[in-house]
Image (spheres, rainbow, N blue to C red):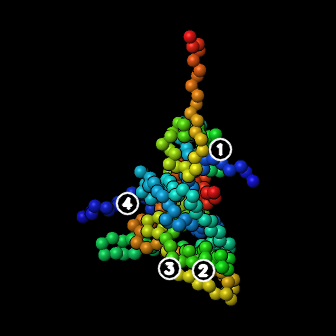
Amino acid sequence: MASVCDTILAADIIPNCESPLVKGFEADGVIIPRSYIESFTISSTNPNEVSEIQLASGKRGYKCIQQGASPFNGSTQTLNVGTYANTWESSVQLLVPTWGSTTAKDIVDALSNSDNVVILRNKLKNDGAAKTTGTAEYQIFGLQNGMRASAGERDANSDDTLGGVLLTLTESGAPKSGMFLVSGTAATTKQMYDSFTADPT
Amino acid sequence: MAQEKKFWLKNGIVLTSPNFHGGAVYTNANLTDEIAAEYLVLFPAMVTRFSRVGEIRPKAKAKSKKKAQ
């Protein structure tokens, strides 16, 4: 018997030859302190789409650039089976490529104890299940429950991290598997994405 | 250094309306003070989407041709 909030399968599960799966993220992302978000608007036609995220006056998000062949490698999304409802846990792994007093204060310590929203760009641009394009690129993590640091390590002698800080941010208990920034056309969505990191001064 | 703009949108806001400049899309990157002022004359309630607002001058009405007697 269906309960009140059950969602029902509504699309075929078949590959789309015009929009085949492509793994990985682009090298750039945006991290926004969740407290800086004044409001956001969920699409009336798709609850997994966010058409607008408005930051508070004078606030901005911050760019997160990852070098290497697999940016944000280790980032995952996992279904958690609950007693009454299943939820999703998302983790984003990133390397802080600098170190020192400012990095420790403004980046590592800040991310260690705060709720954040992370927007990453999938290399996959189009959702093969959809008839429209551009609905797979800008994926939002942490909008529902916030991304908090769940792991962190700095190995000064690591050949991989070269002494940078490897951080994992995690959102637990999210009711939705994925939230995407979709605002009209792909060009408009890109303009919105670019505007998050504008200097508000 | 570019002159500081008088109008500045809150970050994340994209201005677009089918009734304004043919649906053109504006962010802080391409929004001029003139366009912002024009927009707010038409849509004054949208001032909440700005973090900084300059002077807004409604379009002047056409001068009456009648002379005062």
Q: Which residue is mark 1?
A: B32
Cβ–Cβ below 8 Å for labels 1 and 4? no
- Residue A9: mark: 4
Cβ–Cβ below 8 Å for labels 3 and 1? no
Task: Please provide percent x and percent y for residue A131.
Answer: 50, 51
Q: Residue at x 51, y 76 (%)?
A: A113
The earlier-in-sequence mark between 3 and 2 is: 3
Task: Describe the element under mark 1 as helix, strand or loop.
Answer: loop
For label 1, the crowd category at 10 Å Cα-Cα, with few meaning under 14, some 14 to 19 and many 20 or more, is some
| Quadrant for the N terminus of chain A in the image | bottom left
Q: Which residue is mark 2?
A: A166
Indicate which label's residue lies in the foreground, 4 or 3: 3
Q: CA distance from mark 3 to mark 2?
A: 11 Å
Q: Is residue B52 visible?
A: yes
Q: Which residue is mark 3?
A: A150
Type of the residue with mark 4? Leu
Using the image, name the chain to which the residue with label 1 belongs. B
